[in-house]
Amino acid sequence: MGLALAACVKAYNCIFTTSDKQSKEKIDILRALGAEVIVCPTNVPADDPRSYYSVAEKLSSETPNSVWCNQYDNLSNREAHYYSTGPEIWEQTEGKITHLIVGVGTGGTISGTGKYLKEQNPNIKIWGIDTYGSALKKYHETGEFDEEEIYPYITEGIGEDIIPANIDFDIIDHFEKVSDKDGAVMTRRLAREEGLLLGYSAGSAMAGLLQLKDRLDDNSMAVLIFHDSGTRYINKVYNDEWMKQNRFI
Ligand SMILES: Cc1ncc(COP(=O)(O)O)c(C=O)c1O
């Protein structure tokens, strides 16, 4: 979304590749801003020529005078969080934060924010939220990229079938996996019980924190990052039929 807005202001042509599991609203909003969106199949390996990673790379090599932003491996991603999100959280908690909980996709948010916060106070714990079907947690714990860990899942925005350069595994203390169902159910609870209409990965982050609650005590100040608003998920987690189709309710 940020890139699409910047492209409008700078009069650049912007082309996005995405996977067909992403909500329709996300694609519609990008197109509304004049961007071109190419929708690629989700259930193919990352190195398959049809994957959204491969299509983006090929487009950039074939398009003269183009830049491939590549959110996965372009370290400007995590740097932006080092200079913005990290200081914002440190200042707003007056340095009292003890735990940061973040859903991990490209790893830009957790790595940049976490690095800044650990530089201020090395005792702050940085916990990443992962999905079942993603290779990240096992890679963090064993150093092994295990393809057996990878299978299609429904949660949007977190978990990976690649190891993005933006993930700084050294600053992450723990990865917690959250199921598609637990994330979806918690997303709805946050709306109805807290009045927070948030995206699917926000529910996963909160569900993950509750799975880890015994590691917190009265002196803890845990900060969760909620990555998205709920309007793009109205026809998914907020829709009873969709929830029933996926056997989540
Ligand atoms: C909805 C949502 N949640 C979480 C994330 C994960 O953030 P990051 O890519 O910085 O790890 C993303 C990333 O785009 C996202 O779109």
Image (spheres, rainbow, N blue to C red):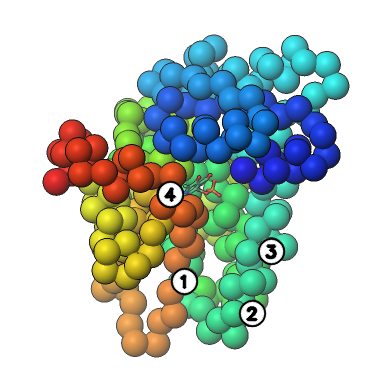
Identify which residue is drawn at 65% across, 58% down: 81
- Asked if disc 4 and disc 1 are in contact, CB closer than 8 Å, the reply is no
Tell me the amino acid under the disc marked 3.
Ser
Indicate if the residue with disc 3 has its beta carbon within 8 Å of ligand 1: no
- Asked if disc 2 and disc 1 are in contact, CB closer than 8 Å, the reply is no
**Does label 4 or label 2 sit earlier along the sequence?**
2
Q: Specify whether 58 is left or right of 103.
A: right
Residue with the mark numbered 1:
223
Tell me the amino acid under the disc marked 4.
Thr
Vertical placement of 112 versus 146: above or below? below
3D distance between C-alphas at marks 3 and 4? 25 Å
**Does label 3 or label 4 sit earlier along the sequence?**
3
Note whether residue 176 is visible.
no
Element type where label 2 sits in the image: helix
Residue with the mark numbered 4:
231
Q: Residue 83: x, y in percent?
A: 72, 63
Q: Specify whether 229 is left or right of 150.
A: right
